[in-house]
């Protein structure tokens, strides 16, 4: 079971999205996390292999394919398969990359990811990472805390992982027969 989920553990940055309490004025609304729906873009962490042979982290915007000001942004992308896995606390996986691009969505637990530059980053419940370090030495993963790490892995097409899908209907289905398309049209009428 451990080998099956070696590629599941990946990078994140805790604190990059937090604002110190002193920075928030009394009476101001709480800051919006770049990972929360803002009506503009959904921002996620992206880990990729660099020309130096090391993995690097950056924040990227997912392509917008729905939503708008004041309600959830939707990114419709193609997936090749989905996997849910658990890894026990204390497990360590030395430098490794991923075979194909994938979203990693942490459902429970925490893991620490190490990069070649010596930096360490924490991925926690609710974090989403596009793991795309298919070249180079990769990253390390250590399950921390007392709770098993549970990750939902959504593998993406190798050649075009972030190419948006026109709609959420299955390929080949006429939009009028697709429940998702009907719900979308109905939602537009209710505004």
Image (tube, rainbow, N blue to C red):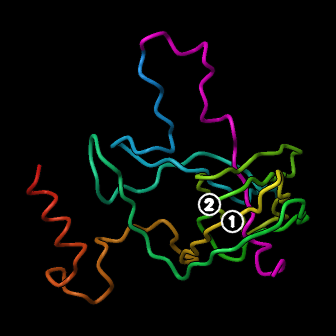
Mark 2 — residue?
A: 107
Percent x, y for residue 161? 52, 70
| Residue found 29% across the figure and 79% down from its top | 169
Mark 2 packing: few (<14 Cα in 10 Å), some, or many (20+)?
Answer: some
Query: In this view of the protein, which residue sits in the foreground, 134 or 123?
Result: 123
The quadrant where residue 9 appears? bottom right
Q: Could you say whether the residue bearing mark 1 is in a helix, strand or loop?
A: strand
Q: Are marks 2 and 1 in contact (CB under 8 Å)?
A: yes
Quarter residue 1 falls in: bottom right
**Horizontal and vertical percent position of residue 135:** 76, 68
In the displayed orientation, state which residue is furthest to the front: 146
Q: Nearer the viewer, residue 22 or 10?
A: 22
Toward which corner of the image does residue 102 lie, by quadrant? bottom right
Q: Residue furthest left?
A: 189
Residue 20 in the magenta stretch? The answer is: yes
Q: In the image, what residue occupies the spot 35% across and 71% down?
A: 165
Reply above or below: 16 against 95. above
In the rendering, at what x and y percent does residue 66 appear? Answer: 29, 57
Precedes in sequence: disc 2 or disc 1: 2
Residue ranking furthest to the top: 26
Residue range in magenta is 1-27
Q: Is residue 109 above or below residue 120?
A: below
The 10 Å Cα crowd at callout 1, few under 14, some 14 to 19, many 20 or more, is many
Question: Mark on residue 150?
Answer: 1
Residue sitting at the far bottom: 172
Camera-side residue of 69 and 190: 190
């Amino acid at each position: 079971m451990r080998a099956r989920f070696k590629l599941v553990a990946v990078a994140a940055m805790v604190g990059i999205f937090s604002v110190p309490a002193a920075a928030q004025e009394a009476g101001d609304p709480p800051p919006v996390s770049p990972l929360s729906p803002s009506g503009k873009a959904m921002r996620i962490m992206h880990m990729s292999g660099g020309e130096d042979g090391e993995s690097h982290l950056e924040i990227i915007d997912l392509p917008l394919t729905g939503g708008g000001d004041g309600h959830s942004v939707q990114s419709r992308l193609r997936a090749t398969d989905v996997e849910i896995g658990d890894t026990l606390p204390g497990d360590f996986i030395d430098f490794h990359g991923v075979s194909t691009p994938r979203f990693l969505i942490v459902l429970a637990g925490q893991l620490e990811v190490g990069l070649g530059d010596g930096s360490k980053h924490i991925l926690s419940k609710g974090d989403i990472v596009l793991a795309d370090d298919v070249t180079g030495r990769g990253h390390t993963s250590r399950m921390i805390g007392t709770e098993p790490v549970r990750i939902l892995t959504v593998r993406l097409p190798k050649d075009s992982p972030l190419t948006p899908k026109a709609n959420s209907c299955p390929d080949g289905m006429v939009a009028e027969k697709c429940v998702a398309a009907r719900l979308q049209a109905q939602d537009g009428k209710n505004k």
